[in-house]
Amino acid sequence: MGEIIASHSIRGAQRIPETAMRLNTLTLLGATLLLTTHAQARVPGCAAAGLSSGTYTLEHAGLTRTFRVYVPPGSTGTVPSRLVMLFHGWGGNEDEFLGDSGVIDEARARGYILAAPRGLGSGAPDHGMNSWTFRGSATGLAGAGAGVNSNSVATAICDTASTPDYRYPSCKTGTAKNTCSWTQCQDDDIGFTVALVRYLETRLCIDTAHVYATGGSNGGMFTWELGQNSLSAPIFRAIAPVIGLPHRGYLGGPGKPDHMPVMLITGLNDPVVPPGAWDSDAYTTTSNDKDRFYYTGATAITKR
């Protein structure tokens, strides 16, 4: 099932620099309740509790990855808690969500554990904006569902003639196929996310049947990828992307055989990641003053 919910209170994202989003925390965290109508059987998944609220690192693929955790008061090693994974926008970090007292207040009231990892880009070799990589964002290529000739420039995820070159140094050695590439190529973010969730399950008492993902802008786009990828989708009960859509042509359905509930929170007046017209399957185009990126429309992706 899928819903498109328009929220006029969410600010549009900017690529350079991206404004830290003050999100509607009741809607975001409340989504984990709305999306559990057909909840699975509870699987404790508990091990020896060992993490408290704070910032930690995890080694993955030879890199040191950073994440921040919030553990609500009263959490024990015997009673499973629901886990919400939070993915920041382009240029953000783990404090974009967990530095917001409203997010913490809502999690405390519900007894949720929160985990907010940091994307890559601010350290060698990139020294740029922290980012999450999803299909098309690093290669610069549109998906097979774009419906255009493979020899056409329209197979790119942007208009190369009018969009600045955002390529990261880590992508210029082969991954980027054109100048539309705009996220990091240092690590597999899907693999890292799976490893992080599994790690948290060994250090905290998590209800593994109720693990959720949400993110804003670039993080929202990555949230769709988590729900579509067959490696990560089975981990998540539901996803809630915020002002984030897949790039043009990436119309894959849920990455697991059973259903993947989704709540999309989008801005009708957002010029950076516009949702498109209601009931239209057409792709959408960024309309700010310097970028022309192409995205799958909100109606088309939620139908899938």
Image (spheres, grey):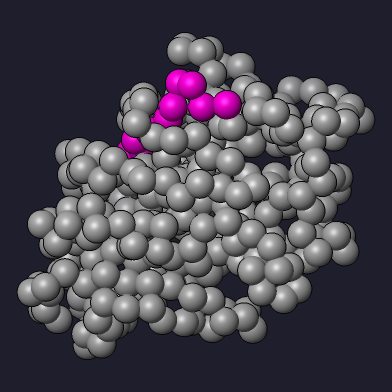
- Residue 220 is left or right of residue 168, and the answer is left
Q: Name the image quarter holding residue 211.
A: bottom left
**Residue 57 point in image, percent of width and height:** 46, 82
**Residue 263 point in image, percent of width and height:** 34, 35
Q: Identify the residue shown where x is 49% and y is 63%.
A: 93
> 290 or 41: which is nearer to us?
290
Query: Image height check: is 95 above or below 68?
Result: above
Query: Image height check: is 277 above or below 173?
Result: above
**Residue 154 point in image, percent of width and height:** 82, 27
Residue that protrudes farthest toward the right in the picture:
151
Q: What stretch of residues is rendered in magenta? A: 257-271
Q: Identify the residue shown where x is 61% and y is 66%.
A: 120
> 16 or 166: which is nearer to us?
16
- Residue 45 is left or right of residue 222, and the answer is left
Task: Give the position of the N terminus as an image quadrant.
Answer: top left
Residue 258, magenta (yes or no): yes
Q: Is residue 236 in view?
A: no
Q: Identify the residue shown where x is 65% and y is 47%.
A: 16
**Residue 60 point in image, percent of width and height:** 57, 79
